[in-house]
Image (cartoon, rainbow, N blue to C red):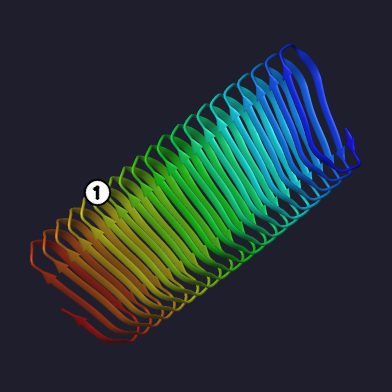
Amino acid sequence: MTIKAAVLGVSFKMTIKATVIGISFKMTIKATVIGISFKMTIKASVIGISFKMTIKASVIGVSFKMTIKATVLGVSFKMTIKATVIGVSFKMTIKATVIGVSFKMTIKASVIGISFKMTIKATVIGISFKMTIKATVIGVSFKMTIKASVIGISFKMTIKASVIGISFKMTIKATVIGVSFKMTIKATVIGVSFKMTIKASVIGISFKMTIKATVIGVSFKMTIKATVIGVSFKMTIKATVIGVSFKMTIKTSVIGISFKMTIKASVIGVSFKMTIKATVIGVSFKMTIKATVIGVSFKMTIKASVIGISFKMTIKASVIVVSFKMTIKASVIGITFKMTIKASVIGVSFKMPIKATVIGVSFKMTIKATVIGVSFKMTIKATVIGVSFKMTFKATVIGISFKMTIKATVIGVSFKMTIKATVIGVSFKMTIKATVIGVSFKMTIKATVIGISFKMTIKASVIGVSFKMTIKATVIGVSFKMTIKASVIGVSFKMTIKATVIGVSFKMTIKASVIGVSFKMTIKASVIGINSK
């Protein structure tokens, strides 16, 4: 059909009750049309259904509605829009096996409102959505409900013109193998939302987004209520983004979750929030920052067993405020934080309350640029085996704080710090209210440090506490304060001074049995003021 004059209402209705091979709809619109409707009900096998529409004049209201009740091989929708369109709607209900469903849309003129709604109640192999936007679009919506097995779902979107509001909503109630979202943004977008609820097994979920133009508001929300193997988020930001949010709630087993983000342009506000209520094996966060970022937040609540959690962050541009908060209420094996800072950072915070058994917690930080304010706060209320802090400073740092409260058995706590650039203010505060076996502090100072403070209060049995400090550059003010209110076996202080130190203070108050306290100090350079009490 070719329309060259104004048309009010175009309607196609087809009911298929016997086998059909090849159905083709082709429409070219060259004049204003108000209301186009396609309605198809399939009750017998069909091989090949094709819709092709080219719009070259204003259209108000385009509707496709298809109900499939028998086997279909190949359904194709292809639409090219070259003039203003208000309202495009696709609705498909699948109640019988379908192999191959393809939607392809190219937009070259303004569109207001595009809606895809699909309900799957029978097996489907291969669903593909491909959209290229080259003109302003207001409102794009994808809604899919899956109630039967699906193999392969692909969303691919390329945006080359302004878009306001993109929404993906998927509810999975039956097994799905392979879900892929790929989006490339080359023009301003306001509001991108992904919402997925998983109630049946899924193997492989992939989100890939490349941003090359300003985006305001990107949101990922996923609720997992059935076994999932492999979830991957990959985002590359090459233009200004305001507000990126990831929210995931896990209520059943998941194997492998990966977040990878590369930031090459200014970002304001990045938030990761994850609640784990079922076993998870392998969680990985990797972030590379090459442009200014204001506000990065990681919040994780663990209520079920987790094996392997990894955070890796490389900062190569200014960052203001980085926050990690993890609440552990179920057993965790292996937690690692690795951060490399190569540009100015203001405010880095780690907060971890541990309320269930943890085996292996590792913090590793390398600082090669100015940092103002680094804070570690850990509260341990359940057994922990192995906690390690390793920090290397190669640039100026102002304010480092470690605070640890231990209320349950801990085996092995290690702090290792190497300072190769000026540091102002280092504070360690530890309160021990449960048995601890092995606490080690090792510090090597190769650059000026102003103010180092160790404060430890022991209210439960401790076996082995070791402080080792080597000073090779000027230090002003070193303070050790220890209050012992429960039995301790083995306390060792070893200090080697090879550069000027002004003010060293040791203060120990013992109110319970202690077996073995050792102080060893070697001074090879000027020291002004040593006080041991």
Q: Of 479 and 346, which appears nearest the observer?
A: 346
What percent of the width, then of the height, locates residue 332?
A: 35, 44
Q: Of 310 and 199, which appears nearest the observer?
A: 199
In the image as oriented, which residue stretches furthest toward the front?
Answer: 8
Name which quarter of the figure residue 18 lies in.
top right
Tell whether 435 sits left or right of 424.
left
The residue type indicated by label 1 comes to Ala
What percent of the width, then of the height, locates residue 213?
A: 69, 60
Q: Is residue 510 above or below residue 193?
A: below
**Going 33% across and 43% down the picture, which residue do you hit?**
303
Q: Secondary structure at mark 1?
A: loop
Residue at label 1? 382
Tell whether 512 sits left or right of 377.
left
Can you say which quadrant of the picture contains the N terminus?
Answer: top right
Q: Of 509 and 132, which appears nearest the observer?
A: 132
Q: Is residue 476 above or below residue 188?
A: below
In the image as oriented, which residue stretches furthest toward the top?
Answer: 18
Tell whether 355 sits left or right of 76.
left
What percent of the width, then of the height, locates residue 64?
A: 71, 33
Can you say which quadrant of the picture contains the C terminus?
Answer: bottom left
